Every structure is written in C-alpha cells, then in structure tokens.
C-alpha cells in the first residue's frame, strides 16, 4: 500500500491516573508465590515492565477514547464539524451493539455528516484503521478522519489475580495467565487528513504492508466469561516464536515496498509487549536497538493503544522531527502483522 497525500495532522493521548507496579501485583499474589515458591521480582525481571496504569474509576472504552479525542481536537487545526470519518479501533468496546464509535461521536459532539464505525483486530486495530482512513483520503472519498482507541485492562488484571489465587493451580496451570499481568490501560487519538489541508510539518504516511498467518490464531484468545468478566489465555512461548517468524517475513516485504533497508529508519516503534519480544525482534530483523523508542517498561501492554500512544510520546519529546524516517512495526494475535513507514 502506498500513500502520497496523507498525513497525521495531530496526535494526543490520555494516561490513567493510577499506577500499579509489578511489585504491587506480586504482593497481591503473595499466597500463590509462597505456595509455589516463586521468587518475588520475577514479573518485572521476565517482562521488563516496572509498572502499568489503570483508570481510577469504572470507565467505558468510549469515555476513555473521548478524553483523547478532546485533546487531539484542541491540538488540531481541523474543527470537529469537519471530521468526515470517526473510527474506534480498540480491543475493548462498550458493548456488542451499537458501535463504540457512536458513543465517542456523541461525547465529542461531531457532525451529523461524520461516518462512524469500529475496527477490531486485537492489538493491530489502530494501524488497520490508519490504513483504512488513509486509503479513503488518498482516493478522495473523504478529506479528514479521526481514529480513537480507549483500552481498560483493569478488569482483566483483577479477574486474573482472583483466578490465580485458586489453591488448586500449579506452576504449569498458571502459565497461560501470566501475560495478562502485563496489561495496562490508556487512550489515544489521531487526526488524519489530506496534506493540502494543513500547513503544519506533519508525519506523512508513505507505505504499509501486511502479513497474516492464521495458523496461530489459538495462541492468544480472550473472551467474556459467564459472570461477564474478562478472561484471556496466552501461550507466550509459542506466540513469541510465531510472532518473530511473521515479523521476519513482513520486514522483507516492507523493505521491498519502501526501498528502505535496516539503516533507513531513524526511529523504530513496535507494539509494546515486553523485553523478551523487543530483543528477539530486533535481533531477528537485524535492526539497531538504539533506534527503538519504548514505553512498555512504565505503561505495560495497552493493546491497540500501545503503538500509536508510543508514537505520540516520541513526537512530543521531539524525536519525530523534520527529515526523519520512522518505522512502525505492529502485530496482533490472530496472527497479523502490519508495518508502516512515516516521514516528515
């Protein structure tokens, strides 16, 4: 996929106020750790995640998304009644029907002419939404789009803590639930538009590629329970192996599509899973780890919010600046991988 006239006109994010350290989580699991003789500190040691953030009150995904949406509108030259398309692209959603985007539209007071819908593809949904909106802008079907995502991992973590305190569990039976403890929460919003509509020096979307391998769609599965809670099980070891494999194939496609090589990107932002994934990915793709910009150590894995929020933070810190090239390397359980090239 190639884009010529599509830019990210504004980015904004909202971080939840409450911080949970990995140590805090292990204290809650003290009886499990003592019974199975697990060393305290293993959660941070294995993942590199020191803390993650959660909302301090019950919050719907649309509410979180709207918080980021209000911020991005305040930083944009584009007015709310000029938004042609609104996409909600989170893993979490308010309910099955209607689309969470409809609630965000109402919260923000967008125009009656704004098209709304949800995009769901695990942690890759936001990048998918960028491609969909970018294609519509490139083909002159629309001129401006807002993409939002609000994730709330707290219910999943709390239900996992409750589950792990079951005295019948042993070392093997706790493994599928370990990845749940890396989950955090957050919200992010982007405004995309045709380059002719802004005078700002904005990141331009150049190319995107996809690689899909659904042979591994059972390695990470999440659903609601009978008690309307959340449950997720992950085969972390096999998912890491499959993820690295699909990333290698995707990177080769990406280089062909963009004519970039390993030294071209000035900055690289990946989906924020943890330390093991980060190191093995960069080693497999022969990329310079010094070019990585990460947030997983203090925000954990925020699902679809992780990669775009990390990009927004990098831009906020002045790393995404004029003359620079940035590679976005996304992946979602299923498994699907998308890589995107940005330039200013």
Image (cartoon, rainbow, N blue to C red):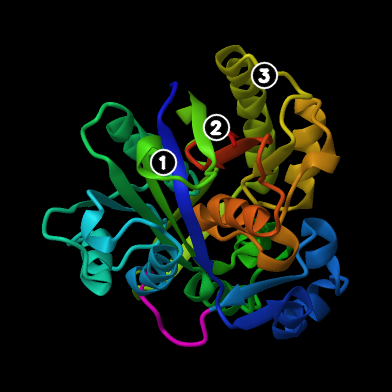
* Picture coordinates of residue 68, whole percent (x, y): 44, 68
On-image quarter of the N terminus: top left
Q: Which residue is mark 3?
A: 260
Q: Secondary structure at mark 3?
A: loop
Q: Which mark is residue 130?
A: 1
Label 3 crowding class (10 Å Cα cut-off): few <14, some 14-19, many 20+? Answer: some
Q: Which residue is mark 2?
A: 340
Q: Is residue 116 above or below residue 66?
A: above
Q: Is residue 322 left or right of residue 150?
A: right
In depth, the one of 284 and 177 nearer the eye is 284
Cα separation between marks 2 and 1: 10 Å
Residue 212 visible: no
The structure residue drawn at horizontal position 60% and vertical position 64%, both measured from the top left corner, is 183
Answer with mark 3 or mark 1, whichever residue precedes in sequence: 1
Residue at far bottom of view? 57
Answer with mark 2 or mark 1, whichever residue precedes in sequence: 1
The structure residue drawn at horizontal position 44% and vertical position 69%, both measured from the top left corner, is 71
In depth, the one of 26 and 132 nearer the eye is 132
Q: Secondary structure at mark 2?
A: strand
Label 2 crowding class (10 Å Cα cut-off): few <14, some 14-19, many 20+? Answer: many
Circles 2 and 1: CB atoms closer than 8 Å = yes
In depth, the one of 143 and 90 nearer the eye is 143
Q: Is residue 116 above or below residue 62?
A: above
Query: In the image, is residue 276 part of the stretch drawn in magenta?
Result: no
Magenta segment? 55-61
On-image quarter of the C terminus: top right
Quadrant of the rendered image containing residue 310: bottom right
Does the magenta stretch mainly form a helix, a strand or a loop?
Answer: loop
The structure residue drawn at horizontal position 38% and vertical position 52%, both measured from the top left corner, is 89
């Amino acid at each position: 996929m190639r884009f010529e006239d599509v830019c990210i006109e504004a980015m904004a994010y909202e971080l939840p106020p409450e911080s949970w350290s990995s140590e805090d989580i292990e204290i809650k699991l003290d009886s499990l750790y003592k019974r199975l003789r697990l060393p305290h500190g293993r959660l941070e040691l294995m993942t590199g995640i020191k803390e993650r953030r959660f909302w301090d009150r019950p919050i719907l995904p649309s509410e979180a998304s709207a918080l980021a949406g209000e911020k991005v509108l305040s930083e944009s030259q584009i007015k709310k009644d000029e938004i042609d398309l609104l996409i909600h692209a989170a893993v979490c959603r308010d309910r099955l029907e209607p689309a969470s985007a409809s609630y965000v539209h109402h919260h923000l007071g967008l125009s009656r002419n704004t098209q709304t819908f949800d995009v769901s593809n695990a942690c890759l949904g936001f990048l998918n939404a960028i491609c969909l909106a970018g294609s519509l802008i490139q083909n002159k079907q629309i001129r401006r789009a807002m993409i939002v995502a609000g994730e709330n991992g707290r219910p999943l973590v709390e239900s996992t803590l409750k589950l792990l305190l079951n005295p019948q569990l042993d070392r093997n039976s706790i493994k599928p639930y370990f990845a749940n403890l890396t989950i955090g929460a957050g919200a992010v919003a982007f405004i995309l538009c045709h380059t002719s509509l802004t005078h700002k020096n904005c990141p331009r979307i150049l190319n995107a590629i996809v690689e899909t391998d659904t042979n591994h769609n059972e390695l990470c599965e999440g659903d609601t329970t009978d008690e309307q809670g959340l449950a997720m099980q992950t085969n972390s070891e096999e998912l890491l192996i499959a993820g690295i494999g699909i990333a290698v194939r995707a990177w080769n496609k990406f280089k062909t599509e963009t004519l970039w090589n390993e030294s071209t990107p000035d900055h690289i932002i990946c989906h924020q899973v943890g330390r093991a994934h980060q190191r093995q990915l960069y080693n497999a793709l022969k990329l310079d780890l010094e070019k990585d910009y990460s947030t997983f150590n203090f925000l954990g894995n925020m699902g679809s919010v992780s990669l775009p929020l990390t990009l927004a933070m990098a831009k906020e810190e002045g790393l995404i600046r004029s003359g620079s090239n940035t590679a976005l390397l996304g992946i979602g359980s299923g498994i699907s991988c998308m890589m995107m090239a940005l330039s200013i």
